[in-house]
Image: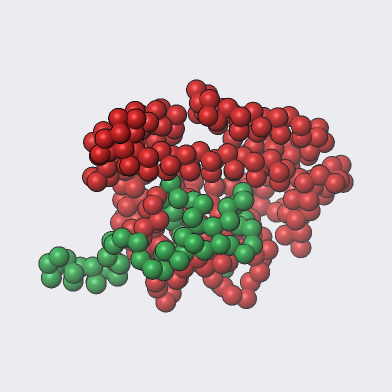
């Protein structure tokens, strides 16, 4: 079993886990079906067969741990380096609120707020520094751009979920964004657009998304059982033409 | 960096903790050709900046 399944469960959104399956003869559908059969799905981990870069090892399993900035922190065999890997991950997550040494002292509070997900407070703090137009102003601008990029990425995630029928997920994301960006006039238009786009989704899509979400939870726990495949087929029939029905069709096909 | 530390690094097959290295750099620019399973629209590793990323290579065989 990929050793980081438990890490994906444990760290949730604090750590992005990407599993790269390197058995070249197997299709991605095979890999996905395999993961469902093993009850490995149900974490935030993502799965692919495309190698974004070499692992640095000739054998598997192998891992590469990247920092939040994309730097290689550690690589090796996750079975043999369990303690080092767990320590490196914990340090990196904890360090999200610890400002880098080279960051001006005037921006440490903004960095800390940003690390906690308090983007609006972080932007306000960084703006104060920038407005002083002193030597720290360029660093303040860079930090504000970094925070803004994070906000835009979160907004884009919610848009993608809406456009692709993941309406249960989109609802949670929009609620979170509304809370995080509540006091930000600069983002109110984007939030309002998301809210309107959500409310304009056809009722049939909502019903289908909710029906599929219930089955998905059972799939994570039980795998692609005959009973759950029949439930997927019912979603396809009852909610024909919806994006969730298309996903249900795909999931049911994995059992073949 | 002293000799003892270098030996330890070699023995444990650790890559030295460095700044960005070329292959990871290329990796961050890497755009996936197919949607990731459970990726919710993630199209490249660059899109994942802001959180640590653990990439694990494994096989079904």
Residue at image position (41%, 32%) is A123
Of all chains in the rendering, the one displayed in red is A
Of all chains in the rendering, the one displayed in green is B
Specify whether A120 is left or right of B41.
left
How far from the left and from the top, in percent, is residue B3?
13, 70
Regarding residue A176, the answer to whether it shows in the image is no
Please tell me how many numbered marks the rendered image carries.
Answer: 0
How far from the left and from the top, in percent, is residue A204?
82, 36
- Tell me which corner region of the image, top left, top right, bottom left or bottom right, holds residue A106: top left
Specify whether A36 is left or right of A87.
right
Residue at image position (37%, 40%) is A141
Residue at image position (39%, 35%) is A114
Give the camera-side residue of A104 and A71.
A104
Regarding residue A165, the answer to whether it shows in the image is yes
- Tell me which corner region of the image, top left, top right, bottom left or bottom right, holds residue A146: top left
Q: Residue furthest top?
A: A183
Q: Is residue A204 above or below residue A7?
A: above
């Amino acid at each position: 079993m990929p050793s980081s399944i438990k890490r994906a469960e444990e760290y949730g959104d604090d750590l992005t886990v990407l599993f790269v399956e390197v058995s070249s003869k197997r299709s991605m559908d095979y890999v996905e079906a395999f993961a469902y059969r093993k009850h490995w799905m149900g974490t935030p981990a993502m799965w692919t067969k495309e190698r974004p870069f070499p692992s640095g090892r000739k054998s598997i399993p192998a891992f590469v741990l990247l920092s939040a900035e994309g730097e290689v922190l550690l690589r090796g065999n996750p079975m043999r380096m369990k303690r080092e890997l767990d320590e490196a991950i914990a340090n990196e997550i904890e360090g999200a609120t610890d400002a880098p040494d080279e960051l001006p002292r005037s921006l440490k509070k903004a960095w800390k707020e940003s690390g906690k997900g308090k983007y609006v407070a972080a932007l306000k703090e960084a703006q104060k520094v920038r407005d002083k137009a002193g030597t720290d102003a360029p660093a303040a601008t860079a930090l504000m751009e970094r925070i803004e990029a994070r906000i835009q990425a979160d907004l884009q995630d919610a848009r993608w979920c809406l456009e692709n029928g993941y309406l249960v997920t989109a609802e949670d994301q929009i609620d979170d964004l509304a809370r995080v960006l509540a006091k930000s006039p600069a983002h109110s238009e984007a939030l309002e657009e998301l809210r309107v786009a959500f409310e304009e989704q056809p009722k049939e899509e909502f019903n289908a998304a909710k029906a599929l979400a219930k089955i998905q939870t059972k799939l994570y726990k039980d795998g692609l059982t005959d009973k759950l495949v029949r439930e997927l087929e019912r979603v396809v029939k009852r909610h024909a033409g919806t994006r969730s029905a298309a996903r249900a069709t795909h999931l049911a096909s994995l059992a073949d | 960096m002293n000799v003892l530390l270098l030996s330890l690094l070699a023995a444990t097959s650790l890559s030295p903790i460095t700044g960005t290295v070329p292959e990871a750099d290329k990796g961050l620019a890497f755009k996936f050709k197919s949607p990731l399973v459970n990726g919710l629209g993630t199209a490249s590793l660059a899109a994942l900046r802001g959180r640590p990323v653990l990439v694990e290579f494994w096989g079904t065989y």
